[in-house]
Amino acid sequence: MKLVILSLTLLVVSFSVPATASAYQWFIYWRNSSLINGQIDYNCSGSTCNSPLYRAGSGSGTNACQHNNWIPLGSYNIPFHQDHYAGSAIQGRVWRLSDYQCSNGVTRTELFIHSEETSSNGQYCPTGGDDPFCWENANDYYSNGCVKVARNPVTNGASDLGRLDSWVHSIGAAQWLDVTS
């Protein structure tokens, strides 16, 4: 008799959430104690849609509550995602993150997940040096406090940024970013 009751209980639980339900989506960024060797992926509830881990970087220093240093640990809302953002400092595929209030009084603003590309998702490399809309090498993982994902190299037809963006467009908009150590 106990075995039958246990089976019924498991049956009810397994059907309480439809297999196709996807209530919310989010990014997770692991800093990995490194400015340029972090990792980011895309997750959702209600199904198994975890993306692969992609290399990412953040900041130019480790004091998270100073401007231009790596992003502070915590959760950030994502007010919008744009594929053709035309900002003055960053362009292309971006996810805007909410501001972060540090305990020392500093408010971290203008936080994004992004790469180095033009608003048309191309590359503009006029100098042969470090151009802001051109992904040249691993030093491009450094940022002004945002989370940066590689625009190059292109592997199997897409960059890491392109693959992450494809996950978002196939599954649904991410609502937040969790930053962990």
Image: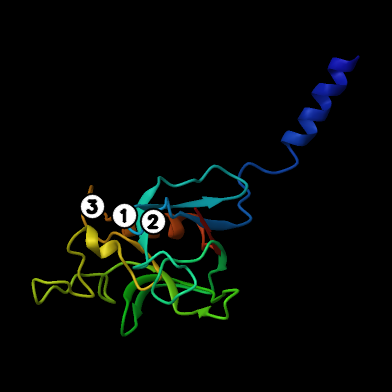
Could you tell me how many numbered marks the image carries? 3
**Residue pointed to by mark 1:** 160
Picture coordinates of residue 94 (x, y %)?
A: 39, 70
The answer to whether the residue labelled 1 contacts the one labelled 3, judged by CB atoms less than 8 Å apart, is no
**Residue pointed to by mark 2:** 164
Numbered disc 1: secondary structure: helix
Q: Earlier in the sequence, mark 3 or mark 2?
A: 3
In front: 26, or 34?
Answer: 34
Colour style of the rendered protein structure: rainbow
Quadrant of the drawing holding the N terminus: top right
Picture coordinates of residue 19 (x, y %)?
A: 63, 41
- Which amino acid type is shown beneath numbered disc 1? Asp
**Image position of 103 (left or right of 34):** right
Picture coordinates of residue 128 (x, y %)?
A: 8, 71
**Image position of 59 (left or right of 126):** right
The answer to whether the residue labelled 2 contacts the one labelled 1, judged by CB atoms less than 8 Å apart, is yes
Q: Nearer the viewer, mark 3 or mark 2?
A: 2
Numbered disc 3: secondary structure: loop
- Which amino acid type is shown beneath numbered disc 3? Gly
Picture coordinates of residue 16 (x, y %)?
A: 75, 41
Numbered disc 2: secondary structure: helix
Q: Nearer the viewer, mark 1 or mark 3?
A: 1
**What mark, if any, has residue 157 been given in the picture?**
3
Q: CA distance from mark 1 to mark 3?
A: 10 Å
Residue at screen point 10% across, 77% down: 126
Q: Is residue 23 above or below residue 135?
A: above
In front: 13, or 71?
Answer: 71
In front: 154, or 99?
Answer: 99
